[in-house]
Every structure is written in structure tokens, then in C-alpha cells.
Image (tube, rainbow, N blue to C red):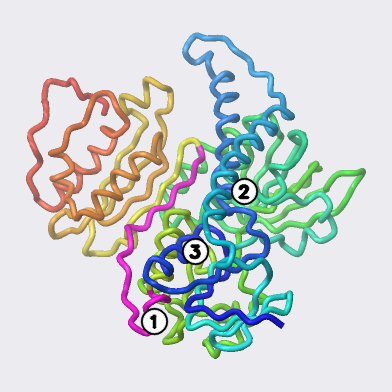
Amino acid sequence: MTTRICDVAIIGAGTAGLAAERSARRHGASTLLIDESFSGTTCTNVGCMPSKLLIAAAAAAHGARHARTFGVTAEPVVDGVAVLQRLRFERDRFIAGVDKSIAKIPDELKWEGRARFTGPTTLEIDDGTLVEAKAVVIAVGAAPSIPEFLDPVKMAVLTNETLFDLETLPASVAVIGAGPLGLELAQALSRLGVETHVFDQGDRLASLEDEEVSGQLAHILCAEFPIHLKVQLSAKLDAGKVLLSWSGRSEGSERFDHILAAAGRPSRLRGLGLEKTGLVLNEHGAPEADPFSLQCGAAPIFLAGDAEHGRPVLHEAQAEGAIAGHNAARYPDVLPGKRMVPLSIMFTDPPMAVLGDISGGSSTVLGIASFEDQGRAKVFATNHGLAHIRADLLDGKLLGAVLAAPAAEHTAHLLAWAIQHGMTASQMLALPYYHPTYEEGLKPAFRAICKAVGSSVPMERDDGFLAGT
């Protein structure tokens, strides 16, 4: 029986785990990185990159199909085999880049296998190897969740971990889950000629608390494919297809080639033996981690990345891994890490973004900007969407925003940077805005905030040049 001794053991070699290992080693700790396969990260394998490759193909088809808006006639012919071949080719190039990063870690610092706790900082790997560490970082990531009602049709169920390996595009797909993953893939599949329906038990898209923005987004997307909210579902096999029936806000039944389960990605904490750590576990069997130090209670155990589930996006996984690795290396001298402004983006068309603090309240003011009459949006026939920007009622300092608008993935970054630097609406209006750009579309919201808080509005042209922005 082999025993490995180290300062910091890291479970999981995804984005957060790799960052944690680098950080811990950089701060003088001896490390051991444990993973079941060292096969790359969620982002490159089954997440960010392959989904955006599918979206890119869909955008090309959609652009051709709607070229007649501009007086150009075109009709796309979608080759499903070629679409998925290019997707996998480019995906594999991204994976190769991650593999190079993993290969740079010395072999003696990596161990392949599945780990589980046998004590607060002791682990057993499924090959019988024992690991004794001073601190442990849990970075096991998350996995797709398949609802129980799909058990009778499991052979026809896809997830984001299997969709991209199809030989060609299916004729029809029912997407279960109206969250960011489900909506991104649903719109892409629909634009590529796949008959697509979306179903969700909830009553708003992407669980958006902002009812007006959620409604605007639903109105736009429903023009492309049906979205059935607040429904209960059942499924069975029928003539080689899945007969999906739904009831609730709407009722019906339809046959689909496949069901795409996109109703969430719970953390992969089950089976880790967390009950052996002495940590207090919640009703889901997960420990609570401090959002700044990533420490679980007072224990030498740290939780990072999608396993932590607070901010399941790549740049946060990298940041959390770095914080967790640093604190694990210096335990018990744990320090809070500096966290970035929360930022999440859904790459639908139009994109949706949520950033900062959008909780609202009597001490805040809301600035609204519609893109229906916005100059750049009208030029490119993307004139729909809405931006809600929250600011402090006292001084107009920006706090957060919800957007479903053209180029929202870019304007959301500008807003997040401004919030992180403590800027006010008045200061934002004093910055340069090139014409015609989508960024100009935010100015009505900033003006409304300035008016509400009684702050000065920088001088702007009054000759009508910016009319309709």
C-alpha cells in the first residue's frame, strides 16, 4: 500500500483545481493533484468552447436566412455532419492547450484516481493509495442532472457532455431547462434547422428575478422557437421517438428524436466521503464555504470552482482556485481573497447578462434603457432588448445591472469594470461614446439615474446628432 504525504492535496484537475495547485505550489507548499482522468476542463470539453462553436455555426445560418432584411437574398444549407466535425476539430485544439498545461505539472505531483475522505485531511484513492495532507482543496466541478421522469427514455437523452459527439444534427430536440445552458443550445439548434422546444417548471427565463427583462427576452426568443414555462412533464417511448407530454400553463404532447437535459449541473460532491471530515453539511450533503476565503468552517478544507456553486463561471473558478490554493498553503493563517464584481453572461441572441448587486430596495434607483429605437441596433436590425441599471440613490454610484440587449456581453463588461472601480452614472456620461455604437444605448439609463439623484449631467450635443440613441 502506497502512502503519499503532502502539504496540500487538490481533488479535481479542472479550471479551479489547476489554479489551486499552481497557487499552493507558488506559495511554497508541496502539492498532490488528484483527478479521475486528467482529461481537460469542463469549459474546453463540454462547456464554454463547444457550445460557442455551435452558436457560431448557428449565427452563420441565421445571418444568411435573414439577409433579405438588408436586400440580400440567401438561403443557408446546413450540413449537420460538417457543423459537428468543425466543432469537434476546434474543440480538440482547445483541449490540447489544456493538456499542455497539465503536462507541465511534474508527474510526481499528479495522481490518477478517484479520492474520498477517510478523515479531516486524509484521503484514500480507489487504487488503494493513501494520502496524508495538511490541507485539502475540493475542486471536483459539477455534472449534468437528468430528471427522474426521463428514466423511461434514457437512451434518447442527451446532455452537454454527449450532444457535441453526435455524428449529425438531429431532426428534433426537446430541451428541458430554460436556464443559460438550455437557452443557448436551444437557440443554436433551432437556427441550425432542428425543430426545438424548451420546457421548464419555473415561470421565468434563466431564473431572472427582473420580471420586465425576463419578459422581454422571452418575447424575443419565442419568435424563434416555442418556450413552455410553468409546466409538468412526462415522457415515454413511442414508435422509436420520445413522446413528451406537458401540462400546466400550457398543455400538449409531441414526439422528439432526443431530449436534451439542461436543468442544472449539481456539484460532484457525492461519494467524496465528506461525512468523514467532521464538517457540517447542508441538506444537499455539501459544506458551506466562506465566499472570500473559500474555507469550510474552521477546517483545513477549501472549496473552489463549480463544486462551490456560488459563481459557476470560468474566470471565477480560476480566481477561487487561486484563493483556495493560497489559503490551503498558508493554513491556519487564512486570509480573505479579493473577489470580483459578479458577472454572468448568457450567449443567446440577444445576449443576457447579470452583474453586480441587483437586489434593489428603497436606497437604490433604477435607470432603464430600451434598444427598440437605438441607432446602431436599428442599422443592424437588432433593435430590441432592455437594460436595467441599479445605482445608489445617494450619489448615483453604479451597483448592478440586468441586460437582455444586443452586444450585452460587451456592454456588461464595461458596466462590471465601472462598478468595480466605484464609478457613478455622471462619471459614465463624461466618458467618450463613439457613434454609432451599442454602448450609446446605455446613456438613457445613466441620464435617468442622474436625474433621480440630482447629480450633474455632463454637457452633451443638443443638435439632434445623437437622436435615437
Judging from the image, what secondary structure is the residue with disc 2 in?
helix
Residue tagged 3: 305
Q: Which residues are magenta?
A: 327-348
- Image height check: is 373 above or below 294? above
Residue pictured at 61% horizontal, 73% vertical? 269
Name the residue type under label 3: Gly
Give the crowd class for mark 1: few <14, some 14-19, many >=20 residues within 10 Å. Answer: some
Name the residue type under label 2: Asn
Mark before the other along the chain sequence, 3 or 2: 2
Nearest to the observer: residue 277 or residue 380? 277
Give the crowd class for mark 3: few <14, some 14-19, many >=20 residues within 10 Å. Answer: many
Q: Position of residue 465 (x, y in %)?
A: 18, 20
Residue tagged 1: 331
Residue tagged 2: 45
Task: Place residue 201 in its image quadrant.
Answer: bottom right
- The answer for how far apart the CA atoms under marks 3 and 2 are is 16 Å
- Image height check: is 306 above or below 385? below
Mark before the other along the chain sequence, 2 or 1: 2
Assess whether mark 1 and mark 2 are in contact (beta carbons under 8 angstroms). Answer: no
Nearest to the observer: residue 320 or residue 196? 320
Q: Is residue 303 visible?
A: yes
Residue pictured at 65% horizontal, 30% vertical? 192
User: In front: mark 2 or mark 1?
Assistant: 1
Q: Position of residue 23 (x, y in %)?
A: 41, 65
Instruction: Farthest residue to the right: give it.
Output: 239
What is the chief secondary structure element of the magenta stretch?
loop
Name the residue type under label 1: Tyr
Q: Which mark is residue 5?
A: none
Left or right of residue 126: residue 394: left
